Image (cartoon, rainbow, N blue to C red):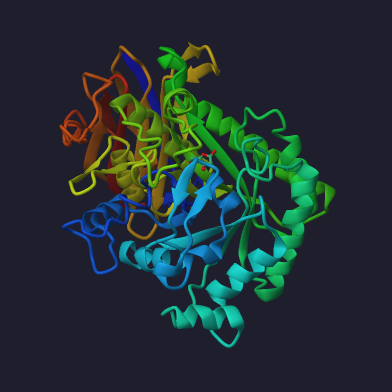
């Protein structure tokens, strides 16, 4: 049996848990939009064609802000194709995923859908094949109340009120050779700086996200951030991070420790941003928008699913439809732990993606929808992580991983809501074989009450929810939790993620 322990002291605060940490991402990719959120004719669809069952699941997931419309898609996208009368919208070749885009959903429809799920729009402009003018155009269309050509066009299209988009991404993954318009850090930095300063002439309070690296493994990582931030520091608020994880063969030990890599990535980007802050003698802290993160079986996509036949680019093909196992959900939960642990720097994050495409929610055309295993750590963390993230003293044995060196077998983070006294502890046991006896030292908290303890675990770490068996995996109450003498003690099964909710009077 592994033994691990944390001490909780609400006086040691990392930073506020921003609700935007529980954001997600909807890209015009595969069946995320079409046959995902939008399926006219489905028995639950509303008058706009939005599936009601999906709306309910997205609300249950507890998503705060949604990045849209891409992703790689955005670098070939003309935003104006997706507004106005639907029967006049063009069909286009979509180069990022080799599909046909029908443009039946665009900015206005997506903003309408966001009202149903009660989430904020985070909009990405195309800086791959377009530039400053188009970014200004979509900003005018979206945010100016009326009285100009493009704002009046929005009103004429049936949206009298502006969408008032606060957060804007300046392109997507411009460091990636796969990106349409891929450029050097210097070229992109200049374009992003010009775009940011032009957008801020219209609204100085916009929150702008400049592209960081599309992964810490990129050869340009580190230098990319420095060069881009040197060009844009004064006019942007966030630099983005993207990271996807999958097991390499059967090296599950490294896979379970993926959050070690995420921790390091965040800390290295923050250090680079602080270096530029010093060079600029700036008072401003650059925040991180971790606006793509997830488990993604990318090898499967590259080797099996990629559409290569140019003669037939389908509408809404089944792409990136990964089925997530219990082990994937445990890794996923540990990535959330890493994001919350860095709440002082990571103030926005987007789970990539939301429906059907590497997603917590799956749908079948004309059929049901269901929760993947990853749905559970997200919905539970979004519900319980309130107030501030706490600095924890964690004692855990480590194990050796091939990819990341020594990693703690047990990892945890805690939040405290000073208004309610609620404390949430999120903890992962990475051992493949052993249970962990996990103690939460509550001496500083005084009287503590256990509200709940829920684990995601299964004896079969490969178990998943599928169309044929939609409720195979569900989170379960962890009945081992006990109130000790100035501690809360719980047993964590091997390969498990657990959320413990406590109430304290401090
Ligand atoms: O989320 C899938 C893809 O991953 C996005 O389009 C892109 O930005 C990233 O490479």
User: Furthest-bottom residue in view?
Assistant: 147
Measured along the vertical axis of the image, is residue 9 above or below residue 57? above
Q: Position of residue 486 (x, y in %)?
A: 30, 35
**Rendering quarter of residue 359:** top left
Q: Position of residue 154 (x, y in %)?
A: 49, 78
Q: Is residue 15 visible?
A: no
Nearest the viewer among 37 and 382 is: 37
**Rendering quarter of residue 151:** bottom right
Q: Is residue 140 left or right of residue 36?
A: right
**How many numbered dots are placed on residues in this image?**
0
Q: Is residue 145 left or right of residue 481?
A: right
Quarter occupied by the N terminus: top left
| Residue drawn at (70%, 39%) of the image | 271
| Residue drawn at (28%, 24%) of the image | 492
Measured along the vertical axis of the image, is residue 494 above or below residue 419? above
Q: Position of residue 484 (x, y in %)?
A: 24, 31
| Residue drawn at (83%, 52%) of the image | 280
| Residue drawn at (23%, 66%) of the image | 46
Q: Is residue 451 visible?
A: yes
Q: Position of residue 336 (x, y in %)?
A: 43, 39
Nearest the viewer among 371 and 434 is: 371
């Amino acid at each position: 049996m592994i033994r691990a322990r944390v001490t909780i002291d609400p006086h040691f605060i990392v930073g506020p848990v921003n609700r935007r940490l529980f954001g997600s991402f909807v890209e015009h990719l595969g069946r995320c939009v079409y046959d995902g959120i939008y399926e006219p004719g489905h028995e639950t669809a509303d008058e706009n064609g939005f599936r009601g069952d999906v709306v309910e699941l997205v609300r249950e997931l507890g998503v705060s802000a949604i990045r849209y419309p891409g992703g790689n898609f955005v670098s070939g996208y003309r935003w104006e194709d997706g507004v106005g009368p639907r029967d006049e919208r063009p069909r286009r070749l979509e180069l990022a995923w080799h599909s046909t885009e029908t443009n039946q959903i665009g900015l206005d429809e997506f903003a309408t859908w966001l009202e149903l799920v009660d989430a904020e729009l985070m909009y990405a402009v195309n800086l791959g094949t377009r530039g400053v003018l188009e970014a200004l155009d979509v900003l005018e269309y979206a945010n100016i109340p009326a009285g100009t050509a493009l704002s009046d066009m929005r009103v004429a299209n049936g949206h009298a009120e502006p969408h008032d988009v606060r957060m804007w991404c300046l392109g997507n993954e411009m460091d990636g050779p796969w990106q349409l318009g891929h450029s050097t850090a210097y070229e992109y930095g200049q374009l992003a700086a010009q775009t940011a300063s032009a957008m801020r002439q219209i609204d100085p309070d916009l929150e702008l996200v400049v592209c960081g690296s599309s992964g810490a493994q990129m050869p340009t990582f580190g230098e990319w951030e420095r060069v881009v931030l040197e060009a844009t520091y004064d006019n942007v608020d966030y630099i983005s991070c993207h990271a996807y994880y999958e097991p390499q063969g059967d090296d599950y030990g490294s896979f379970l420790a993926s959050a070690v890599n995420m921790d390091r990535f965040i800390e290295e980007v923050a250090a680079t941003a602080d270096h530029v802050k010093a060079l600029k003698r700036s008072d401003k802290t650059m925040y991180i928008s971790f606006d793509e993160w997830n488990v993604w079986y990318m090898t499967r996509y590259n080797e099996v699913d990629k559409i290569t036949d140019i003669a037939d680019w389908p509408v809404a093909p089944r792409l990136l439809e990964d089925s997530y196992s219990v082990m994937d959900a445990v890794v996923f939960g540990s990535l959330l732990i890493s994001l919350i642990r860095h709440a002082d720097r990571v103030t926005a994050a987007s789970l990539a993606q939301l429906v059907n495409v590497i997603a917590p929610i799956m749908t079948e055309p004309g059929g049901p929808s269901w929760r993947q295993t990853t749905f559970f750590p997200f919905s539970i963390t979004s519900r319980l992580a309130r107030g501030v993230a706490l600095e924890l003293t964690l004692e855990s044995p480590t194990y050796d991983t091939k990819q990341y060196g020594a990693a703690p077998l047990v990892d945890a983070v805690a939040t405290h809501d000073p208004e309610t006294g609620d404390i949430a502890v999120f903890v992962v046991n990475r051992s493949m074989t052993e249970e962990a006896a996990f103690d939460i030292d509550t001496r500083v908290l005084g009287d503590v009450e256990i509200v709940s303890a829920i684990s995601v675990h299964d004896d079969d770490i490969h178990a998943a929810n599928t169309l044929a068996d939609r409720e195979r995996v569900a989170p379960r109450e962890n009945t081992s939790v006990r109130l000790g003498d100035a501690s809360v003690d719980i047993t964590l099964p091997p390969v498990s993620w657990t959320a413990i909710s406590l109430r304290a009077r401090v």
